[in-house]
Image: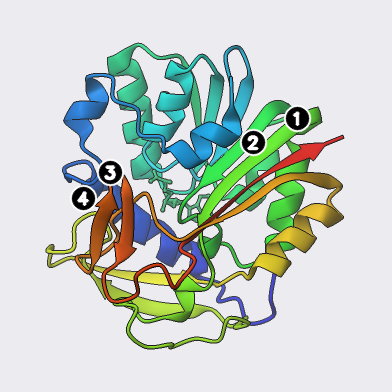
Amino acid sequence: MPANTRPDYLEVNRANWNRRAEAHLHTEFYNQAAFMQGKSSLMDIERNLLGDIQGKKLLHLQCHFGQDTLSLARLGANVCGVDLSDRAIEEARNLAAQLHIPAQFICCDLYSLDQHLNEQFDIVFTSYGTIGWLPDIQSWAKVVSRYLKPGGVFVFAEFHPAMWMFDNDLQDVRYSYFKTDPIVEIDQGTYADKNTQNQYESITWNHGLAEVMQALLQEGLTLEVFQEFDYSPYQLSDRMEEFEPGKFRYIHLGNKLPLVYALRMLKK
Ligand SMILES: C[S@@+](CC[C@H](N)C(=O)[O-])C[C@H]1O[C@@H](n2cnc3c(N)ncnc32)[C@H](O)[C@@H]1O
């Protein structure tokens, strides 16, 4: 862990995600009604990188309340989702039961997964808003590699670190791209419900592309595909417009900024 990691960061972030999970269940952003009726929550970016997952064993890290995990199961994968938030995992289990989808869900800190799970997978997957909650990217890469079988693939889609340099409205550069100190914030509202009065304290870290790539390479993974996108598949702010179906950009920035990156790596 970085030397300045606050000892209570997990408790702060768990409380944050327990409250968000509760709020997110009822948001248009997560559109639970459509999901229950069979709509996939997965985006084309990760769908294209995952390919055919029928019959594959898949580990989903930081699965939130399970929509993506269960969407992956609907595509034929045998899924296991992991998340820090007990409220999110409780809801993921409820959803799986209601939909009669077989799935395993584990509630724990990603860094302590080894105490709960002793298997290997064909695919490890994680996406959108995950690694910023983790102080130590080398230890994260070790978890990814530890759970991949030889010949297994890691599929990762994430918001671009260039985006996290800005304030919430992407007006001003607030943080260095190379910032290693934690970012401690209290946000009004959440990305899925900006109008709520709820406040959320968070402790997060920005991880640059080289930091992420070097960590994964050091764990013995080989890069197969690396992509950057000038749009987000999610509308994260009222300042974003949908310029093509399912593609959002900040109105005042056009296509000037990378918003998402994605990769596929192989464990030999
Ligand atoms: C932005 S969400 C993931 C979003 C996911 N793509 C979705 O929309 O469903 C981030 C998730 O990471 C989880 N998380 C944060 N810190 C974690 C940790 N140390 N270990 C495991 N999960 C963690 C949170 O509980 C939350 O559910």
Residue 106, visible in the rendered structure: no
Image vertical order of residue 66 relative to residue 39, above or below? below
Amino acid, disc 2: Val
In the rendered image, residue 42, in percent from the top left (x then y), is placed at 41, 35
For the residues labelled 1 and 2, say whether their Cβ atoms are less than 8 Å apart. Answer: yes
Determine which residue is flagged by label 4: 23
For the residues labelled 1 and 3, say whether their Cβ atoms are less than 8 Å apart. Answer: no
For the residues labelled 3 and 2, say whether their Cβ atoms are less than 8 Å apart. Answer: no
Determine which residue is flagged by label 1: 152
Q: Closer to the observer: label 1 or label 4?
A: 1
Q: Nearer the viewer, residue 255 or 119?
A: 255
- Mark nearer the N terminus (1 vs 2): 2
Determine which residue is flagged by label 3: 245
Q: Tell me: 151 left or right of 212.
A: right
- Mark nearer the N terminus (1 vs 3): 1
Q: Tell me: 48 left or right of 189.
A: right
* Label 4 to label 3: alpha-carbon separation: 26 Å
**Rendered-image quadrant of the C terminus:** top right
For the residues labelled 4 and 3, say whether their Cβ atoms are less than 8 Å apart. Answer: no
Q: Closer to the observer: label 3 or label 2?
A: 3
Is disc 2 placed on a helix, strand or loop?
A: strand
Determine which residue is flagged by label 2: 124
- Mark nearer the N terminus (4 vs 2): 4
Q: For the point 55% across and 76% down, which residue is it?
A: 6
Q: Residues within 10 Å of mark 2 (few under 14, many from 20)?
A: many
Image vertical order of residue 203 relative to residue 212, above or below? below
